[in-house]
Amino acid sequence: MSTTGQPTPSPSSPSPSPSSGPLHALLEFFSSVKLGITLLFILFVYATIGSAGHYPVIREGGIGWSMQMVRQLRPFELTEFEWFHTWFFVAICALICINLAVTTLRKIPLNRMKLGVWTIHAGVIILAVGSVIYFATKVEGEAPVFRYKALLAVNDNQPASLIAVPGTTTTLESPDGPWTATVQSINPNYQLATAGYEGVTDFAITLSLTRPDGSTFFRQLLANHPQFTEDVLPGKGRVKNLPESNGNPIYDPSLTATVAQPAQDTFWITSSWALHLRESGDDNWYQRPIRSGGMTGLPRYNDHLPDKGEVFLPAGARVRVDPIAVPVPPTQDNDPLADAQVRATGFLRYAQLSTRTVPGGDELRPTANITVTYPTGQILRQRLEALNPQRSAAFDGQLSFAWADTEAAFENIKRDAQPASVAFIIPGAGDNGDALQAVETIAPSDSRAGENAPLKPIGASDWRFRVVGEFPGLEISPGKIISVAVLEIVTPQGETIRRFASSIPGESRDLIGDQPMADPEHGMVTPNPRVQTIYNPTQRGEITIVAGPADDQLRIITRNVFGAVLASPFRPLELIEIARDDAGPTYLQVESYFARGAQVTKPAWIPVEQRNTDVDRLSLLAMAKFEVTRNNETISHWIPFSRYTGPSGDAMALRGTPVNIVPFTFSDGTTIELVFSRETRPLPQPVVLDDFILTTYDGGFTGTPSIRDWTSIIRFPQSDESTDAMPVSVNNPKEHAGLWYFQSSWDAPIAPSANSPGSPGLAYTGLGVGNRHGVYTALLGSILTVLGMIYTFYIKPILKRREQERIYRSLSKETLS
Amino acid sequence: MSPVKRSLPFIIGMVVALGLSAMIVSRLAKTTTPPGEGFASRVDLTPLDEAAVYAEGRLKSFDSFAHEMMGYISGPRRINGNPNDFAYIDLMLRPERYTNAPAVYVKKKPMRQKLIQEIRTDLETLSDEQRARVNADLGRFMDTGLISRTLLDAPRAQALQQEWRRDLIRTAKFADRINTARNVMEPATLRGVLRIVPPPTGDEKVPWLTVADIIPAPAGHGGAGAPPDLAAEMDPELRGQLVRTWRTFERAWIAENADQANAALEEFCAALPLVAPDLYPTQVRLKYESWYFKLASMTWVWVLYLLAVAFFLMSIAYKWRGAHATGMGLFTVALLLHTGSIGLRWWISGRWPNSNMFEAVTTAFWMGAAIAFIMEILVRKGGMRSMFALGASVASMFAMMAAYFTPKMDLFFTLDPNIRNMMPVLHDIWLYIHTNVIIASYAIIFMAAVTGALYLIRRALGGPADHAPLGGTAALLRASMGTAKPNANNDSKSLGEVLDGATMVLIELSFVLLWAGIIMGAIWADHSWGRPWGWDPKEVFALNTFLVYLILVHVRIKSKDKGLWTAVLAVVGCAVMLFNWLVINFVISGLHSYA
């Protein structure tokens, strides 16, 4: 820091030294404050690009709705952490340190006035050293630790274990055949009811056990009270209460079940890829870490397809074909594929394996991709499969797709497409005083107009009616479906009957008064006997596309506004007007059609706007294609990413992170199972979870905002030092054998759903695991910088001022003298 | 000049300041609580407003609870112009009146436009009169953002919401928000979340009860399958009184009998604390919480800061001492009110207010203003007089404007004034140390940018390339120690020197605070997340802000035009700081979840 006009001689500057030459020039180069400013500026720009540099993936209305970071671009493929560890970044930081050290040593005199600057600069160097130690050795990961597992065995057969999370299941061997054991439910706060144990709570596990003969019973285990283990028979209750048991709580003593703590000995490394493999039947997994990011590693953010035909792409989507070949060499002894070459040849950031019908083959699978284009320009796409009941209709059944293998079948479909009708029987209104029988078609125009529709005569009588509304397919009680048309029937005398005409005889009702649905008990009465009605709803929606009998034959069946059924042939890509309003016509188009196809399973690429950000962030729907070459035989499959592996992975699968095991079967019969997951490392010592405590604010647990803290009571049973449990809570990590353990995630209660049996939660804890070498060095450096700043800004001016005052005083003394 | 004559401008200035403040405050404090009309103006919900409601782990006044809940429904708007407390109760008791009432808030205008377009195409089947009415409703919807359930249920509007739900990135949140609003406005929801009765057991870790929870099950329904009676331990007489008065209140409300409703409600609310006197928050706190929200968190104090800025600028431009005194007076009153709002919030929430954006912004600039006030006392005789107060006034004005206006606007960020519990990770001593140091540095950075910007304006207007020769605290010391002989007459310094000096004083302070704050953040992150530094965008941009000042202090050594470079980099640093605070927090962090 040379300042202009300061006479203080610099210790190393003027006199020609023997080192003048390249070394001197280099030293001069590094003694420049301007160089420092330039480097700091470059650092600023680099950091800005890394943290805020992004460009829109989806742009609409001038707004970038979905962004991709520059660091995620194809050549980089870097995480935040990696962006700040590139050679370029390291070089800039190193140059800044050299520049700072050289300038300080050569240009800044070490005196009282410059002490602050020296302290700051020394602090920066120490901070840099600490950071190098820290970042060079950094390991960061996480480990789920479950509270309990059940150990089960039938007689003396091979025992099996089940982690205590609702839904885990296993089979138990026995001479009579296999048993099935499933964790039916857990209760982390089970209140003991036995006398003498009031107020005591324990962790209860209820197992559902199915014996080889198919009979089922339940067993309840209490983690810390094995003496209260008891069986429950479905429909009968606790076994000990049954008269025949004589108070014995155990129904089937051949099953022994105990509770133990599952020790976690592994943690999963953040932002890593690895392939886990084992020979089918082997219990042990072997892993091969996969290099990630950059030009040569397995990508994280961009899709890399070996071939366009590898994925199902939505219409209009474009994905670049960009094959990769990332070698995945073995790193462990006994790797079951040690003799084989493994490579990753493709990557998809967000996709799901999907089985679909594609053209080709002999099997009859009539499939049509249709679009409906509205006057507003909105386009809806739908894939219809005539012989697949789940996919044969769209738009609430208004559009359906059918296959007619004969002309007679086509005529049947056409008949089903007849519009809805009402059959009337009016006693005494026919010729000669007979009953009048008439079937009146309900044209779409009638039912749409509702109460404004004109009254139409019933048959040739003076009776008239209109349709106010149609309600097809109402489920009035489980399994009982009726269709109802709401009619207004006007008698020749001018009275109006409001009739809820049912499709089932005897279910019709009349409505009295003006309160339609509000008071059904009182408003609805047995129908007026002067007119009987049966409502026949239509069997098909407005539009039916029929394929067949010939493979390439397509016909469309529609109803016009008057209810007439029309059928006409058409070809794929033809625009068919299906409706028209003031805004214009609505068109239907069959974009593609085939009658015969084959089923294929491939990854389906999911458009960016349909991606869930949390799923994406955790790469839960990423997948990679792996190619294994062994004895001149090459097999490749897409393998969806699994967040966890091994037994913990199986239990975590029930909390939304499935384990996807893909078998590779070779011609010699060998089957190797592969899992695409994260790199795992062994914990120095296994950890168990003694307790998990949820602390709430006043008012108890009523959702996430009511949580005050989470505390995992963890213990290292193999530790020599102590077997004491350690509480780990938020902001309160604990160290053991060189690694730090943090409270990271928890097992929140899950409501039962189609995908999950539900759980009261608290069955495991998510611990963050990491090391932190060099932090005290960095801290020391940081403190020095702060002290130096305070000295420079607030102490130095005082010192300088005093010095000035001293000089002025001596000057004035001199002047006086 | 006689002492009286000399202090005359000061006295006049102060009188003007106090007069203006009194006028403005009385105006603003009044307009924030407009009463309802008709029945709404006749019912008195004050006893209920000051009753405690349990919500999400916090006990709050009903008034602030209703404010928060209605925010889910009508956003920043009021349904039928009624206050939130009235709207809550009325929606709960007379939902049928709201079927056609514009009640659901749709945030973005383009989304409103799309809904309107769809609903309009559905209008063909309506009569002319109906169509005209719907069109009028749609017009108001475009302006206010409030739409009725009936219109949201129009078939095409339904189809549009379905379509919105499919696009998770662009539109799903709008459909979800509408859904949330509709769920919240269901009477069953409003009743179910109104946990207003303390648990009779007096156990503080047990959820509070709703009125439905204390209504005894009808005779014959107490069998084995019946839900447990949560209020079994309540004094039967008290329980009877609560149930009876609440029922009377409901019936009277439905019948629009305001007098009877008021009497019943008062009796009901008076009985509530008796259920569990130890658990019940003090009436004073509830009263002030209600009052705090009725005063719109006092964010309107920006008007006073604005006036102070005007007077400070006048005093600088015209060297008019009266204007300076008025500015200082206004600034002082604004700071006092600002202090009041911070203190009130502190007391109500039971914690220092710095755990969400609203609190961070209002507290940061309060600290800035307080520091400026102290500095003004230190330099009261020097040339830098009013510079710090000016910087703080501009900064606090913008901060309080953000707090006042953003909840009402469609911006990319909103400062939400509702008081909530802190997330578990925030319970740490470092929250107080790190966060306050950082946000104080942010406020000072902003103040430095104000004096820097004034310097640049002066240069743009042809001012000379001057700068404070000593810079920073050195200049300040010189002014305050006052014994030095050279340049003793500080007033003779040029305005450029003064501005540059003030900028440097502020930059030095923020430089140390920001750096120390970053280090403290690393210490906290180390024991909370397991890493002192993880290159998170917020961390990087705090460092980036510091890098700008690092460049500044070194450029000041090398550059010839020190004043210019200092001012330019002070403004750039402030821009980077604001980018971190607003764009990184509200935009990039959101994107970050995708990345």
Image (tube, coloured by chain):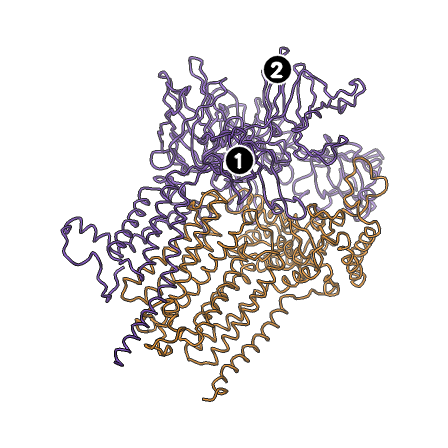
Report the side of B421 relative to A47 (left or right). right
Rendered-image quadrant of the C terminus of chain B: top left
Residue at which label 2 appears: A178
Q: Earlier in the sequence, mark 2 or mark 1?
A: 2
Residue at which label 1 appears: A382
Q: Nearer the viewer, residue B233 or B180?
A: B233
Q: Of the residues shown, which amino acid type is indicated by label 2?
A: Pro
Local crowd size for mark 2, using a 10 Å CA cut-off: few (<14), some (14–19), many (≥20): some
Which colour is chain A painted?
purple
Label 1 marks a residue whose chain is: A
Q: Is residue A514 above or below residue B326?
A: above
Label 2 marks a residue whose chain is: A
Q: Nearer the viewer, residue A364 or B100?
A: B100
Image coordinates of residue A162 in percent, x first then y, are 59, 24
Rendered orange, the chain in question is B
Q: To which quarter of the image does residue B20 belong? A: bottom right
Rendered-image quadrant of the N terminus of chain B: bottom left
Secondary element under disc 1, as helix, strand or loop, is strand
